Image: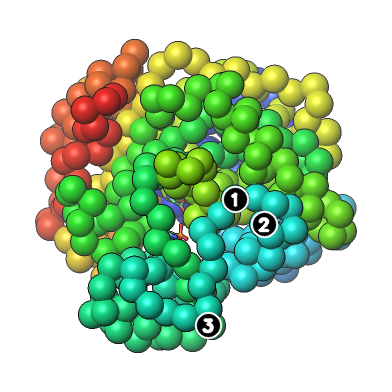
């Protein structure tokens, strides 16, 4: 198969890495891709949200499948544009992607599907959570434990320009639960945990994610099936009933509360950086699974999950998440790979014969091992090989006592 992968982050580099191992892959192309993806396939200078450009490129390449990584093109309707022209796409329609693109839509679907979620509140009074309604790259959520936090949250959330959602504040452990979906069926992927706050000890502002690991103790295959029965499958059925079946990855961000799992949010795509930790654990032909989902029939697909563990540490620019770092030279990627880690490019550029920073999250370093502890040790020793000015990473990814 010829595949066109849309996107340019660490998640897309990890997808490219996994796709490049698939027996059914003949050619890998990416738009726009990144310098890491360029070592696995051919990158084309077409923007991820340029539906016309992607349609033209898919035609010129005679692509058998387009895999869309990020949410913005999905919410903007890129998958529809391709599908209407007869191109097979892994990724939901704009209507189905509203499950991520609009928090009020997601709440409405969850209510009709009877899926447990944080209760919506009609007035903002601490403790509560304030959310901007539209897409905000994980940065539009404000936890308000007191008055002062609430006041600044209302100001900040208003700045996103959308209406706001007010929710009860839930406490518990958070997990990311992913399912490949063909419009009707949901196939479980490994559960991962993400570290969203910028600073160690879960302090500082929310980010897109500073690290991840998989497996998460207590969430093996039987527990995941139960979660899919409670959450993903009712949502799929509800979306299908509304005439907008969901094809792609349905990603539920859950809080495990003493009263049971509660949905914090849905995403319409793979998690970043969860994907970097879950793909190394998958066995089987990943491309064949994505193609089957895109074709609307996952019934014959069987992806097994290996016993090994993976830990991913995000190397970020000094000012992330407030601002990007551009043009700083990066050292030590090859040395980190020699240690045995995977190094995914998230925000880099090539300048002459070297890599430089070009974003907020710059690189993702993934260690694989028999246990989370082993994987973590490898990831961190590889991180020490890499440097760029003002590089910053959390030292406590996957450092829980129960792992
Ligand atoms: P979201 O973008 O909705 O996933 O929110 C980002 C992060 O904010 C989540 O991963 C949680 O850490 C936190 N969060 C969101 N909603 C709630 C809630 N109702 N109670 C507690 N924390 C929440
Ligand atoms: N890491 C969380 C996300 O991809 O939204």
Q: In percent of the image, x 77 and y 36: which residue is there? A: 185
Q: Position of residue 244 (x, y in %)?
A: 81, 58
Which label's residue is closer to the chain start, 3 or 2? Answer: 2
Q: Given this view, does label 3 or label 2 mark the residue nearer the observer?
A: 2
The residue that disc 1 covers is 116
**In the picture shown, does residue 119 fall above or below 391?**
below
**Distance (Cα) linking label 3 and label 2:** 21 Å
The residue singled out by tag 2 in the image is: 110
Q: Which of 373 and 14 is in front in this view?
A: 373
Q: Is 82 placed left or right of 279 in the picture?
A: right
Q: How many marks overall?
A: 3
Q: How crowded is mark 3: few (under 14 residues within 10 Å), some or many (20 or more)?
A: some
Say left or right for 175 vs 203: right
Residue 144 spot, x, y in % from top left? 31, 70
What's the CA distance linking mark 1 and mark 2? 7 Å
Respond yes or no on whether mark 3 lies under 8 Å from ligand 1. no
Residue at (18% x, 48% y) in the render: 201
Query: Observer-nearest residue: 358 or 163?
Result: 163
> Is the residue 3 above or below the residue 73 in the image?
above
x, y percentage for residue 389? Answer: 12, 56
Screen quadrant of the N terminus: top right
x 42%, y 85%: residue: 158
Contact between labelled residues 3 and 1, with CB atoms less than 8 Å apart = no
Q: Is label 1 or label 2 in front?
A: 1
Question: Rounded to the nearest whole Å, what is the CA distance between mark 1 and mark 3?
Answer: 25 Å
Labels 3 and 2 touching (C-beta < 8 A): no
Residue at image mark 3: 162
């Amino acid at each position: 198969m010829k595949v066109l992968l849309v996107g340019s982050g660490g998640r897309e580099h990890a997808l490219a890495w996994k796709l490049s191992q698939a027996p059914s892959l003949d050619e890998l192309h990416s738009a726009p891709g990144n310098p890491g993806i360029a070592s696995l396939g051919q990158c084309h200078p077409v923007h991820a949200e340029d539906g016309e450009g992607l349609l033209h490129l898919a035609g010129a390449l005679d692509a058998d499948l387009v895999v869309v990584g990020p949410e913005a093109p999905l919410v903007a309707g890129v998958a529809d544009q391709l599908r209407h022209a007869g191109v097979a796409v892994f990724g939901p329609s704009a209507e189905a992607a509203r499950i991520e693109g609009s928090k009020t839509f997601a709440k409405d679907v969850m209510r009709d599907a009877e899926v447990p979620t944080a209760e919506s509140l009609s007035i903002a009074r601490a403790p509560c959570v304030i959310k901007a309604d539209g897409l905000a790259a994980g940065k539009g959520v404000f936890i308000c434990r007191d008055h002062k936090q609430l006041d600044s949250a209302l100001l900040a959330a208003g700045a996103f320009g959308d209406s706001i959602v007010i929710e009860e504040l839930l406490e518990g452990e958070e997990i990311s639960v992913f399912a490949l979906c063909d419009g009707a069926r949901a196939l479980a992927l490994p559960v991962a945990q993400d570290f969203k706050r910028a600073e160690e000890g879960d302090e500082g502002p929310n980010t897109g994610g500073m690290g991840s690991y998989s497996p998460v103790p207590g969430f093996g295959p039987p527990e995941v099936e139960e979660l899919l029965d409670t959450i993903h499958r009712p949502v799929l059925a509800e979306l299908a009933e509304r005439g907008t079946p969901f094809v792609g990855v349905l990603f539920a961000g859950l809080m495990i509360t003493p009263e049971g799992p509660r949905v914090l949010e849905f995403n319409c795509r793979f998690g970043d950086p969860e994907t970097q930790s879950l793909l190394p654990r998958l066995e089987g032909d990943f491309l064949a699974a994505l193609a089957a989902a895109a074709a609307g029939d996952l019934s014959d697909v069987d992806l097994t999950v290996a016993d090994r563990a993976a830990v991913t540490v995000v190397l970020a620019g000094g000012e992330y998440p407030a601002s990007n770092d551009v043009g700083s030279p990066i050292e030590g990627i090859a040395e980190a790979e020699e240690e045995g880690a995977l190094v995914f490019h998230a925000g880099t550029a090539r300048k002459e014969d070297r890599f430089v920073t070009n974003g907020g999250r710059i690189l993702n370093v993934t260690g694989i091992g028999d246990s989370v502890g082993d994987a973590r040790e490898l990831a961190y020793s590889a991180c020490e090989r890499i440097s760029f000015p003002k590089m910053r990473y959390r030292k406590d990814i996957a450092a829980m006592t129960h792992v």
